[in-house]
Image: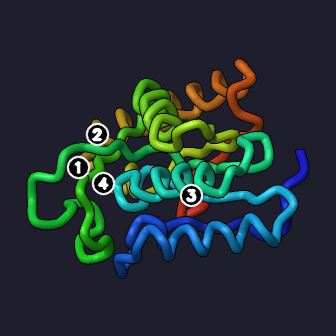
Amino acid sequence: MSIPKILFGTASLGNLFKETSHEEKLAVVKAVVEVMDTPVFDTAGKYGAGLALEEIGKCLEELNVPPEKVMISNKLAWRRIPLTTPEPTFEPGAWVNLKHDAVQAISYQGILDCYEEGNQLLGKYESKMVSVHDPDEYLAAAKDDADLAKRKEDVLGAYKALSELRDAGKVVSIGVGAKDITVID
């Protein structure tokens, strides 16, 4: 597998700090598609509680980009849930005018659910590169030693799920998306 030196990060497609119209998002995706032989989009269920995934799928379809001509990297670990508060509960103040909220779902089943949900939001496109998103934050939220031990097991389960997706040929690569690299230890 050959990966370009430049990937397009899609947090802005999820209304990070600013709401942009679908037309503006379409123009950005079009520009990326026009300048890259095989465009790679880096995204996550956390980005706008899945909005970025939806926008990537819609934009690529509107641009008639064949699924085999694009690579999507999805950082898994955040599931979409109904929005029941004035703004999302994850990263308050960061996401603008969302219709959904998101919760962390790091575990064996959580990662499989995130993978399926992400692909549903992408429409006819599928994530071929996947990673566990924010395991460092998940571990740091442990309330005590027993909770930390359980969370470590959840992270191991998450990587078991990623390995199974790779071994089944559903994805071509697996990894970690974390701010604190020591979580790999």
Q: Secondary structure at mark 1?
A: loop
Of the residues tagged 4 and 3, which is closer to the observer? 3
Q: Are marks 3 and 2 in contact (CB under 8 Å)?
A: no
- Color style of the picture: rainbow
The CA span between labels 4 and 2 is: 9 Å
Is disc 3 surrounded by few (<14), some (14 to 19) or many (20+) residues within 10 Å?
A: many
Q: Which residue is mark 2?
A: 147
Of the residues tagged 3 and 2, which is closer to the observer? 3
The CA span between labels 3 and 2 is: 41 Å
Q: Which numbered circle lies on residue 28?
A: none
Q: Are marks 4 and 1 in contact (CB under 8 Å)?
A: yes
Q: Are marks 1 and 2 in contact (CB under 8 Å)?
A: yes
Residue 114 drawn at (x, y percent): 45, 36
The residue at the far bottom in this view is 18
Q: Is residue 165 left or right of residue 106?
A: right
Report the amino acid beneath label 4.
Answer: Ala
Q: Residue at x 40, y 73 (%)?
A: 21
Of the residues tagged 1 and 3, which is closer to the observer? 3
Q: Is residue 87 above or below residue 59?
A: below
The residue at the far left in this view is 85
Q: Is residue 136 above or below residue 154?
A: below
Q: Is residue 108 left or right of residue 15?
A: right
Is disc 2 surrounded by few (<14), some (14 to 19) or many (20+) residues within 10 Å?
A: few
Q: Which residue is mark 4?
A: 141
Residue 87 drawn at (x, y percent): 17, 66
